[in-house]
Image (cartoon, helix red, strand yellow):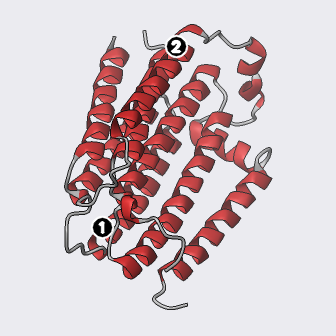
Amino acid sequence: MGEAIAFYFIAACILGFAVLVVTTKDTVHSVLFLVLDFLFVAALYVLLSAQFLAVIQILVYAGGIVVLYLFVVMLVNLKRPAEAHSDPRRKTQWGFALSVAILVQLAIVATREYVRPAPALAAASAALPVTGNTEEVGWLLYTSYLIPFEIASMLLLVAMIGAIILAKREL
Amino acid sequence: MITPTHYMLLSAALFMIGVIGVMVRRNIIIIFMSIELILNAVNINLIAFSAELHNAVGQVFAIFVIAVAAAEAAVGLGIILAFYRNKETINIDEMNLMRW
């Protein structure tokens, strides 16, 4: 019962703030609603007993990425409203219609096609020699998923160098 | 009782809000934030199934998704700054030239 109340409250906050992020005119307000949205997603992770991911979500998203967004919003000093000019060929109604079609499709898949997984999958992490969320994730990350982990670190390095080169005033 | 279907519906709704943002808004910074919402919807799915199956692999993949999201935000915002310096706009309807 308590879990259901917590889930519906957090879900309502996530969706409400997401709508505000997309609809708000002022970009700074939009970024601040994005922070609140990320914090509620972190709360949802805690509800799903993924505490390590919740901390990562707060540190990386609400702490790092959002600061980057705020910096760009401050650096981009617009003389006229961002969305003053509109391409006459733009079809906004089609965008809405396609999005709703995607939601209907996903809802059908989620409610009708889901079957309970085989118990063999459920036993997979019982074989791990550690207990606790952070230990489990760390164990998997540094044994079975070591090469993807290293590739992810290379990706971040390349992205960092690319961002510095792109943002420099002259090449 | 909260089943994975509840989480999947929440994730689908969040995904749709992100898609609407990408398709309807013309401010490229808000389009980038909508992409972050979409990636968060994917993460919610991964972690809901990780909890359902008692298998931490879903959380490992969520970490990779977060790493890719951080890389995407850094490079994308660099491109926005470079573009703004040249054309003084962040409206995607005015981004219609490969070079000038």
Measured Cα–Cα span from mark 2 to mark 1 = 38 Å
At horizontal 53% and vertical 36% (from top left) the residue drawn is: B42
Q: Is residue A4 above or below residue A12?
A: above
Which residue is more in the foreground, A65 or A49? A65
Q: Residue furthest front?
A: A88
Q: Could you tell me the amino acid type at mark 1?
A: Val
Location of the C terminus of chain A (image quadrant): bottom right
Q: Chain of mark 2?
A: A
Residue holding disc 1: A73
Residue holding disc 2: A108
Location of the N terminus of chain A (image quadrant): top left
Q: Position of residue A40 (x, y in %)?
A: 34, 38
Q: Position of residue A119 (x, y in %)?
A: 74, 12
Sequence-earlier tag: 2 or 1: 1
Q: Chain of mark 1?
A: A
Q: Could you tell me the amino acid type at mark 2?
A: Ile
Q: Position of residue A32 (x, y in %)?
A: 25, 53
